[in-house]
Each structure stands twice: as structure tokens, then as C-alpha cells.
Image (cartoon, grey):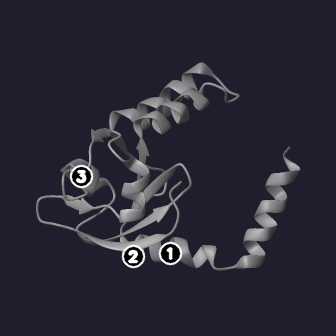
Amino acid sequence: MFLGKYSHTIDSKGRLIIPSKFRDEIGNLKLVVVPWWEGDLTVFTQDGFRKYMESLDELQGSAESRRRIKRFITSGADECRLDSQGRILLNQSLRDYAHLSGDVILTGNMDSFEIWNPDVWAGVEEKLSDADEMRNELESLKQLF
């Protein structure tokens, strides 16, 4: 399980050290790095990514919509492994998509983790800091079920 928030740095070659707690969870598994909805990158284990993609088939809506969503996700995705120093290599197109260079923020998200530009994360974190708003959002989600 990926939990917590960490500050790290991408080096000039695009390598990013993964927090040791995340590395413990990853082990020798292959990873999939995906451009995500809010301008960040999301990193899944290969098995976690497969499960996520299969869950899209369960969604309501047209097959065409599901195909477009899958194309968006998979066309920009890249597979990688941790190197011997616990780093992953983020290709240039992924770094460009998320505006990543130098300092980054990594955040756990249970079955995946996210890589954020610090300025973008600051805006996201500001929205997360309102506990009342988060509680109200949770309550409205509960009503959907």
C-alpha cells in the first residue's frame, strides 16, 4: 500500500529516487507510469495497472467512451523498473506532460502513487485542507450507492 507524501528531485537524466517505503511495496515488480487527469503522473505496479484498466470495462456508458479513455491512459504510459539505486527513469514526454524538473512531490494513493509538480500539488493540497468540504464530498459520494 502506498501512503504518505515525500519531496524528491528528478536528476538531469530524468531519474527519480523512489521513497524507501514505496520501494518496499514495489520489490522487483515492473511499474507503469501514466499521465493522469490532474496534470500529474500516476505510478502503478503492472498488476495494479492491469486491474485498473479492467475495472474500466465495468463502467456504465458506451464502448466508444471506454475505448477513448483507455487510449488516453495507455498511449502515454511507459513501463519501467527500479534500478539498483531505487530510481525510475521518467521519459521526456511524461516529464513534459506533468511539468516536472528538479523538485517533485510524491504522494501515496493506496494502490498507486502520484508524482506532482510542487506548484500544482500546492493547489491540490489547498483544496484538501478543508476538512468540512472533504466530509461533505464523502457524504455526497455515499449517497450515490
What amino acid type should be assigned to the residue bearing mark 1? Gly
- Residue occupying the point 32% across, 42% down: 28
How packed mark 2 is, by other alpha carbons closer than 10 Å (few <14, some 14-19, many 20 or more), is few
- In terms of sequence position, does the residue under pointer 3 or pointer 2 come before the other? 3
- Residue occupying the point 36% across, 65% down: 19
SS state under label 2: helix
Query: Toward the viewer: 69 or 79?
Result: 79
* Residue depth check, mark 3 versus mark 1: number of the one nearer the observer: 3
Marks 3 and 2, how far apart at CA: 19 Å
Instruction: Confirm whether residue 68 shows in the render.
Output: yes
Q: Which residue is mark 1?
A: 123
What amino acid type should be assigned to the residue bearing mark 3? Leu
What amino acid type should be assigned to the residue bearing mark 2? Asp
SS state under label 3: loop
- Residue occupying the point 44% across, 50% down: 36
Q: What percent of the width, then of the height, locates residue 74? A: 39, 33
Query: Toward the viewer: 23 or 16?
Result: 23
- Residue occupying the point 59% across, 20% down: 63
Determine which of the numbered discs, if any, sits on residue 90 in the image: 3
Determine which of the numbered discs, if any, sits on residue 119 in the image: 2
Judge left or right: residue 61 versus residue 47: right
* 84 versus 70 height, above or below: below
* Farthest-out residue, top: 63
Marks 3 and 1, how far apart at CA: 23 Å
